[in-house]
Image (tube, rainbow, N blue to C red):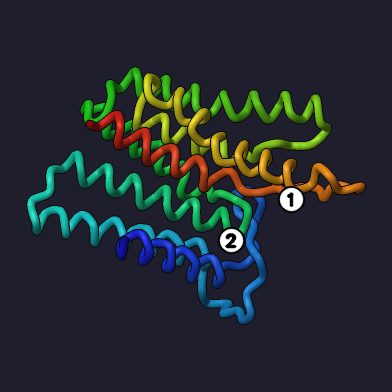
């Protein structure tokens, strides 16, 4: 519990200090109260992630945790960070999702959580599911349903857990939004002018589903 709270607090602090980045990073943030021109927000976020990963690695080596458990913990920490940034800013940074994809493929090249072929299929299918869903949503509703960061995040999860497990992640991740949508509809069904449900980030639901899937596939 303390570990998750500490990671969330670190992500919260970093997200408050980040400034607007160019669109290629897929990260848009709220302006901060002060700005130091000598600080690079990209490097700050990368440094926090690297520091957390380094601390977990050293802790695992010190107490003799099995490497597969250690990597699973690092995977969970990365997802918590992504969820925290998504809640705060509404975007998922490429500088976290892309390295997470590569890390999953490298680990599974050595068959840690899945075979390398299964990991490649998982990453590809994960990206395709979100991208295809977003395409259909745009055609039907004339607006985007998901962001590119969601597709990369699911691709990263697929690269870690493999194809056989990643197919369950979207279904698990949709449970929360469906429950919220249903409760919103029930609360507003008698209103003359029903209140429109505000958009919510999908990253936290993907993160929760990814952690559950990793746990179930590793046991």
Q: Determine whether label 2 and label 1 are within 8 Å by CB.
A: no
Q: Rate crowding at label 1 as few (under 14), some (14 to 19) or many (20 or more) other CA atoms within 10 Å.
A: few
Residue at 57% across, 39% down: 150
Quarter of the view holding residue 142: top right
Label 2 sits on a secondary structure element that is: helix
Location of the C terminus (image quadrant): top left
The foreground one among 102 and 113 is 113
Residue 172: x and y in percent read 48, 32
Direction from residue 199 to residue 154 in the image, left or right:
left
Residue 43: x and y in percent read 46, 63
Q: Is residue 82 above or below residue 144?
A: below
Direction from residue 8 to residue 65 in the image, left or right:
left
Q: Earlier in the sequence, mark 2 or mark 1?
A: 2
Q: Which residue is mark 2?
A: 88
Direction from residue 207 to residue 2 in the image, left or right:
left
Residue at 46% across, 23% down: 167
Location of the N terminus (image quadrant): bottom left
Q: Is residue 145 above or below residue 61?
A: above
Determine which of the numbered discs, if any, sits on residue 198 in the image.
1
Select label 2 or label 1 by which is in front. 1
Residue 140: x and y in percent read 80, 25
Residue at 80% across, 25% down: 139
Q: Rate crowding at label 2 as few (under 14), some (14 to 19) or many (20 or more) other CA atoms within 10 Å.
A: some
């Amino acid at each position: 519990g303390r570990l998750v709270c500490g990671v969330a607090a670190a992500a919260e602090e970093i997200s408050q200090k980040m400034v607007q980045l160019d669109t290629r990073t897929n990260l848009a943030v709220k302006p901060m109260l002060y700005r130091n021109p000598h600080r690079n927000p990209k490097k700050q976020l990368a440094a926090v992630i690297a520091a957390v990963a380094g601390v977990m690695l050293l802790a695992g080596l010190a107490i003799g945790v099995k490497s597969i458990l250690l990597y699973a913990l690092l995977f969970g920490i990365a997802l918590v960070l992504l969820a925290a940034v998504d809640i705060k800013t509404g975007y998922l940074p490429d500088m976290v999702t892309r390295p997470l994809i590569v890390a999953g493929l490298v680990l599974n090249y050595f068959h840690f959580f899945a075979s390398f072929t299964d990991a490649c299929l998982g990453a590809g299918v994960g990206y395709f599911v979100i991208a295809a869903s977003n395409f259909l949503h745009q055609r039907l509703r004339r607006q985007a349903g998901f962001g590119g960061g969601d597709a990369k995040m699911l691709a990263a999860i697929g690269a870690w857990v493999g194809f056989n497990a990643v197919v369950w992640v979207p279904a698990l991740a949709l449970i929360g939004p469906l429950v919220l949508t249903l409760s919103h509809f029930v609360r507003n069904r008698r209103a003359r002018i029903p209140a429109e449900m505000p958009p919510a980030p999908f990253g936290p639901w993907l993160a929760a589903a990814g952690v559950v899937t990793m746990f179930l596939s590793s046991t």
